[in-house]
Image: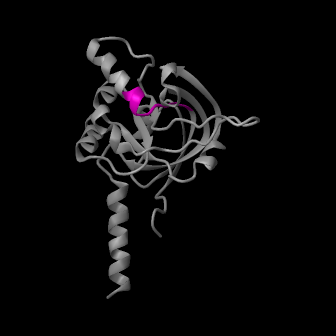
Amino acid sequence: MLLEAKKTFTLTTPLTEEKIKKLRAGDMLYLTGVIIGARDMAHKRMIESIKKGEPLPIDLKDQTIFYAGPAPTPKGKKSGSIGPTTSSRMDELTEPLIERGLKATIGKGERSGELRKLLIRYKAIYLVAIGGVSAYLATRVKEVRKIAYHDLDAEAIYEISVEDFPLFVAYDIYGGDIFEKVKSETQNILSDKFQ
């Protein structure tokens, strides 16, 4: 079966190197704790601050950034819909953040070969959240708080408290790649079916 998890783990943030070294591409991860929501504009502003030698509004050591901004919170709910955005848009903006201790990013879709090399070099991982289920993902959110770049509205930096947030390990610290695994399995299925 495609995308069947190799192993399932439950981890809490912060995601230290000790915690993530046991993860492999294809593993299922239920994540609990605080993650940081930040999209394109927040990334660009953080990179500008780094270039100017200014401090960042958040400590990135062992942090997890979710490429998402929550929709407005409906009355009686803890979070509006929250789903991953396409991660490749952040590829060119990721290295300075990983250099400062960022250990994991969450999004959707494949990333560049250069980004995969950075993850190996800095011992960081890339996790994927399933796209199209943002209302469900919101049920795993316990609290959302805007913490920096308030003027960016939905593109601001958020602190998001999650419980058993479902993710797949897409790229591990050893070069493992879930997308290659899926492509290979698909090719095998098609070969078997049409021989």
Screen quadrant of the C terminus? bottom left
Residue span colored magenta: 34-43
Above-or-below relation of 148 to 194: above
Q: Position of residue 145 (x, y in %)?
A: 60, 25
Most extreme residue toward the bottom, as rendered?
195
User: Is residue 191 found left or right of 132 in the rendered image?
Assistant: left
Above-or-below relation of 79 to 51: below
Seen from the viewer's position, the closer of residues 129 and 181 is: 129
Tally of numbered tags: 0
Q: Residue at x 34, y 41 (%)?
A: 89
Q: Residue at x 37, y 69 (%)?
A: 185
Q: What colour scheme was applied to this rendering of the protein?
A: one colour
Q: Residue at x 69, y 34 (%)?
A: 78
User: Is residue 189 found left or right of 68 in the rendered image?
Assistant: left
| Residue 53: in magenta span | no
For residue 33, say whether it is visible: yes
Q: Position of residue 148 (x, y in %)?
A: 50, 19
Image quarter of residue 189 = bottom left
Q: Position of residue 107 (x, y in %)?
A: 44, 44
For residue 22, say whether it is visible: no
